[in-house]
Each structure stands twice: as structure tokens, then as C-alpha cells.
Image (cartoon, helix red, strand yellow):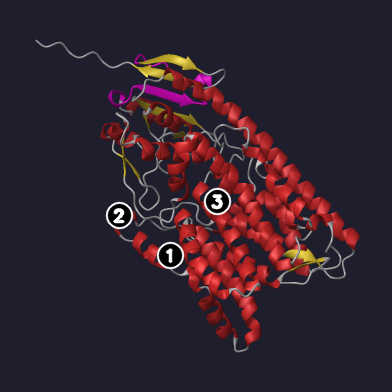
Amino acid sequence: MTSPSPTYARSWWADWRYAAALVLLCAVPLIYPPLPPLTDVLGHLARYHVQLNIDTSPYLSRYFGFEWALLGNLGVDLLVVPMSKIFGLQLSVKLIALAVPPLTAAGLLWIAREVHDRIPPTAAFALPLAFGYPFQFGFLNYALSMALAFLAFGLWLRLARAERWALRGALFVPLGSAIWLVHSFGWGVLGLLAFSAELVRDRGHGGTRFHALWRAGLSTWPLWPPAALMLAWRSGNVAGTTGDWFNWWSKFTWLTNALRERWEWFDIGSVILLCGLLLVGLIRYKIRFDKMLGIATLILAATFILLPRILLGSAYADMRLVPYALAIGIIALRPRETTGRAVAAGLAIAACLFCVVRISTTTWSFAQFSRAYDDQLTAIDHIRPGSAVMVMVSLKCQSHWMTSRMDHLGSQVIVRRDAFANGQWAMAGAQLLSVNYQAAGRFAKDPTQLLRPRNCRGRNEPIWEDTLAHFPRAAYDYFWLIDMERDRWPHEPDLVPIWHGRERGVLYRIVKPAPSAKP
């Protein structure tokens, strides 16, 4: 811990009320939308519905199976069990999603205060990274585990400062296991942060660097028990796959996409600003890095480089780490001892403005996504409970910066009608739900619902002409084209339109062939 600089020891940006206001600000973007406009969350919401209702619904067991297993990816899956009894499922998921950015911000500010003894003027620059691309993508268990890891690391530092070693050991054995259960990545990042802190604290004990590394590793013993859970997870039919190592162009893209949301120039410019701030810290002009958090940032950066794209069944494993590594780097910065108060105040004002502007645009953007959802979701009023719905979502190329976030919107028929919709994931080691609807054949699972232009479609994503010609009409009752432009609506004789959106999207009832008469 560093002694507080007289430059900002009693300044407004170090006041707890300012920190509390920033934390509350991070809750604002998700207050309005009934459905969190986070791409994958809509698909996860359907899985939670199956999890909670498969034993009581007369329809869901026709299409899905669900079996609990020990995974390091169960955070929201477990939380919705008690919460849904009080708030209902949709509101429970919204409340959890709403809480993640404020918890992340609170964790970052707590770490900054423990390390610098006061919140530095630059800290607010880091808070919009709580809304980074992994959160926007809807990796909710992951984002929740990272928020809890940051809060736990703040506690780790606080107990070390008080030299409460026995209490820290007793608390972090269950805390580490709980964070692993939410998502294993949060536990792993907490271990790396704790190792960094112990390494810097231990350097004064003498010996070689190897001895310091060894002692720092041993000091993290309260976080070791989940390693046994990892071994159990990796066994059996939930092992998951790992692959796609050292894709350098993708890794550079993930860095530029750290704050990807709606406007490419604004989002990339924001990342450039943050990277520029880190560069200024490296050259030690007016601001400098705290040693411990600087080492933590380097370790997280090296981890990002070494991670593959798919790890233990979870895709985009490397991408998910980028905003959080940047955030740790930003809160590592503080003014140099020779920096004047005017410069520190200017940095604090700039950080506050950056935070307010980014979160304001996120609030507006989420509201726009939510209104677009509402227009498409009125189709569900025309679908019978227990039906089977073939869904296709018209999407732009993945290189297009802003997405509609409707990739899994069709899964709402599962939630609202106990119906079947193609598009659920079924990857060992990542989900507990299985798709058992054999009649749907190759048109049953993700990504059969994702319709992109042919020149940029992803691996295993469908081709429009092939789907229209070959999806099994007998297996489905409805054909729902989400966000599809009018000039692409089909006019097949067995597809009868029964609903369409204001401008885009159409729902067809599938006319079954009449049974042949017996001779």
C-alpha cells in the first residue's frame, strides 16, 4: 500500500460519496429494458426456464433434457432458483444483470483504494470497462464471477493490510470455491491477482526471485481447493473442448473491441484513449503505475496471449479477459508525487466525464435495443403453447460493428409458450441442457437460427436457400423470421403468414399435408 499523496488526499475524487455515485451510475443502463439486451442472455434465459419448469410443464420434456452436474459455470443458473420464487424468472435475470456492472465498479474502486490508500483521480476511466464486450455479448456467469473476484481481491488486500492471515485463510477457502462455482475464470483471475499482491509484498523477505515466486504461490493456498473441482469437471461427459491457440489477428481485434457497442469510431477511440493513458503511465509523465497492480496487469496480459479461443467448452476464452486486464491497468495509475493539484483535478474531471458519457450512451443504446425487441416479440402472441417453432434471425456480417442482439431472441418462445425453438447450445462442459427433439434433425440447435449473408456466414451457420428447402415441415408448427426485411419473405404454399412486424419480421403457420385416404 502507498501512503496518500498530499496532492489528492482530501480531494472530491477521493471522497466515498463520489465513489458511491459512480457505482450507482453503473446500474442505470439496465433499469429500463425488461429484457437485458445482452446477446447470449436471451438464450440462457430459456435454459433457466427449462431448468425450473421441465418437471411440471406438459411440453418441455418433449424437446429438452436437463441434468445437473458440477461445472465451473453455474452462477446465474443457481441464483435464479431462489430468486425466481420471489421475483419471477425474467425480473430475476434482469436484476442479476443490472447488479453486475455496479459490483464490478465497486470491486475496482475498492482495489484502487486499498492499493493507493485513496481512490486516484484516474480511477473513473476504468469503470465503463464493466460494460465491456464480454458483458455486452451476454457472458453473464463470467461477468458476475469477475465482479465477485474484484470484490474478493479488495478484501484480500484489506486483510493483508490488517495482517489478519488466519481470518483471510478461513474466509477465502469457501469464497474461492464459491467464485469458481459462479465461473471458473473469475476464480483463476482472483488467483493471479492474489499471486501478484503476495509477490510484491514478499520481495522484502530476501532470497532470490525464484524464492519470492515460490513463497507468493504458497501464500495463495486458500484459493487452491477448487483445483480439485476442476479435475472433477474435466472428467466424464462434461469435459469440454479446448482449441484455436495463438490467433494473433483475433487477439488484436479483441483489444480494439474491448468497448464494442454501437458506434465504431467512438468505441475504438475510447479504447485508444485508455491505452494512451497506460502508455503515459509507462513513460511516467505526470502519472505512474503502482508496482503491484502493474505486475498484475502484465500477468493478465500474458494470460490473454496464452489463452486459446475455446477453453473447457467455453468460446471466446481469451477475448473475455481484455476489458478486465485494461481496468486493472487503469486503476494501477496514480499521479506522481511531483504532480500538481491542478493536473490531478484535470485528470479526475476527464475521468468523470469519460465515465458519464460512456454510460449515458450505453443507457440510450440499451433502450434502442429493447424497443426493437418489443416489435419482434409481439409475434409470440400468435403461437400456441407447446408448439415447435423454426426460427431464423436475419443478421449482418460479424465484421459489422453494431449488431441487432437478436441472435437468441427466438428463445423467448421457450420462456413464454413452453415451446421448442432451434438455437439452444449443446456443448459438453458448458451447459446442462440437452436438445432431444430428434424430429428436427440438423435444424435443432445453435447456430441453425443465425442467418448471415453467404459471403460472411460462420462455421456451421445455415444457408437461406438450403434451410427454406429442407427444414422438416412435419417437425415444426411455425416458421418465424426475426428482423427479416420484407423483400426476403418467402411465398411458399405451405407457409401461411399470420403476423408481421411494423417494418421487419414475419411469422408463418406451417400447413401440414393432409393425410392420404385409405383405399
In front of the other: 116 or 139: 116
In front of the other: 51 or 367: 51
> Element at badge 2?
helix
**Magenta stretch containing residue 345, yes or no?**
no
In this rendering, the label closer to the viewer, 2 or 3: 3
Q: Residue at x 50, y 62 (%)?
A: 175
> Element at badge 3?
helix
Quote the CA–CA distance across marks 1 and 3.
19 Å
Left or right? Give the position of 486 relative to 225. Answer: right
In this rendering, the label closer to the viewer, 1 or 3: 1
Q: Residue at x 59, y 30 (%)?
A: 370
Say which mark, if any, is on residue 237.
2
Q: Position of residue 90 (x, y in %)?
A: 49, 34
Left or right? Give the position of 184 relative to 112. Answer: left
What amino acid does circle 1 point to? Pro
**Magenta stretch containing residue 482, yes or no?**
yes
Look at the image and tell me whether residue 437 can be seen: yes
Quote the CA–CA distance across marks 2 and 3.
25 Å
Q: Residue at x 34, y 22 (%)?
A: 477
Which residue is labeled 1 in the image?
226
Around disc 2, counting alpha carbons within 10 Å, would you say few (fewer than 14), some (14 to 19), or many (20 or more)? Answer: few
Lower position in the chain sequence, tag 1 or tag 3: 3
In this rendering, the label closer to the viewer, 2 or 1: 1
Q: What's the magenta region?
A: 473-494
What amino acid does circle 3 point to? Ala
As displayed, is residue 446 above or below residue 234? Answer: above
Look at the image and tell me whether residue 461 can be seen: no
Which residue is labeled 3 in the image?
143
> Element at badge 1?
helix
Residue 251, by quadrant, is bottom right
Q: Position of residue 52 (x, y in %)?
A: 38, 38
